[in-house]
Image (tube, grey):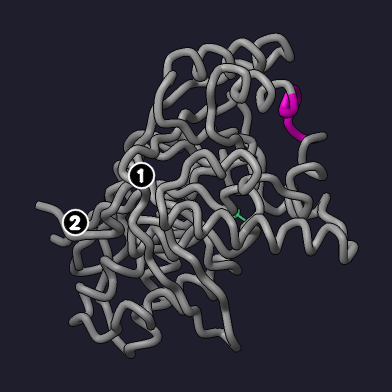
Amino acid sequence: MIRVRVPATTANLGPGFDCLGMALKLYNTVEMQQIPAGLAIEIQGSGAADIPRDEDNIVYQAALAVFERVNYKTTGLQIKLINQIPVCRGLGSSAAAIVGGIVAANILSGSKLNTNELLDLANKIEGHPDNVAPALTGGIAVSATDRGRVHTIKLPPPPALKTVVAVPNFQLSTKKARAVLPKQVSIQDAVFNTGRVALLVAALCQGDLDKLSCATEDKLHQNYRAALIPGMEKVFKAANAAGAKGVVLSGAGPTLLAFAANNFDAIAKAMQAAFQENGIVAEMLLLEPSLAGAEVVN
Ligand code: HSE
């Protein structure tokens, strides 16, 4: 039996829409083994009540994509999912499912694909690389796609950096959160983001967390999505006032994430209270970046 552990991820990091992501120490585990016939899927933890247990299951779909690519025939498959990552909240649950499925299936079928090939396949299934890259490699992943091939560079997160994460008690599909984005943006907004994403990568490389306040600002997606998340601006303000280094929408939301090096409790309480004032109950998590990506565990 193969057991693979995959981290949660926060994508975009503010201005890095579809290109930046960071792995977090919250994990889903995928167990996979061949059985004589059929498909048996067991699910524990997040999403156990809703995630499909048939051919529509995304872990199974991802595994099939690997088997087809390497021309491997299975008799049947048993999959067990032990999930910590909240589903449809902007913390990379679908990326973790895809990456867990392809990594486990690759091992099961003789490890024919290398890391780059696995990433290209995961990106093809997910549609953008910013969650699947750090889910696979760990750390902070800077990615760009060129004709289907993902170029990614893993950066180690600054040692002092932690994240205070507010997970609202409602789901928001990435499809819905992408549908509210404009088809075109102004050159001013593009320049606003280009400068900040460059500054953000440089600040993360040098551990200059005081630059994050400016470097995590965004004009490509967050403002448009604010209407889908009651109280978003107030939570941003509350986190900043309590000492956050920067605050972002995690992936497509609805989770909001504050970068911090201290004041963790105060930031968490402030974010939770601001959400509460807008009628949203949020679970608060303090998560460290995960240097490890998907890996086989005992
Ligand atoms: N970059 C993606 C988005 C991440 O913001 O839509 C969510 O899948």
Q: Residue at x 51, y 59 (%)?
A: 201
Q: Position of residue 270 (x, y in %)?
A: 57, 13
Disc 1: CA contacts within 10 A as few (<14), some (14-19) or many (>=20): many
In the rendered structure, does residue 191 fall within the stretch colored magenta? no
From the image, tell me which residue sits under label 1: 289
Task: Tell me which amino acid carries mark 2.
Answer: Arg
Where ligand 1 lies, by image quadrant?
Answer: bottom right
Q: Position of residue 63 (x, y in %)?
A: 36, 70
- Name the front one of labels 1 and 2: 1
Q: Is mark 1 within 8 Å of ligand 1?
A: no
Which type of secondary structure does the marked residue at label 2 adopt? strand
Report whether 266 appears left or right of 60.
right
Residue 219 seen from this side = yes
Q: Residue at x 56, y 54 (%)?
A: 200
Q: Position of residue 61 (x, y in %)?
A: 45, 67
Disc 2: CA contacts within 10 A as few (<14), some (14-19) or many (>=20): many
**Residue 3 tag number:** 2
Q: Residue at x 51, y 19 (%)?
A: 267
The magenta region covers 228-233
Disc 1 and disc 2: Cα gap in Å?
Answer: 22 Å
Q: Quadrant of residue 121?
A: bottom left
Q: In front: 163, or 99?
A: 163
Sequence-first disc among 1 and 2: 2
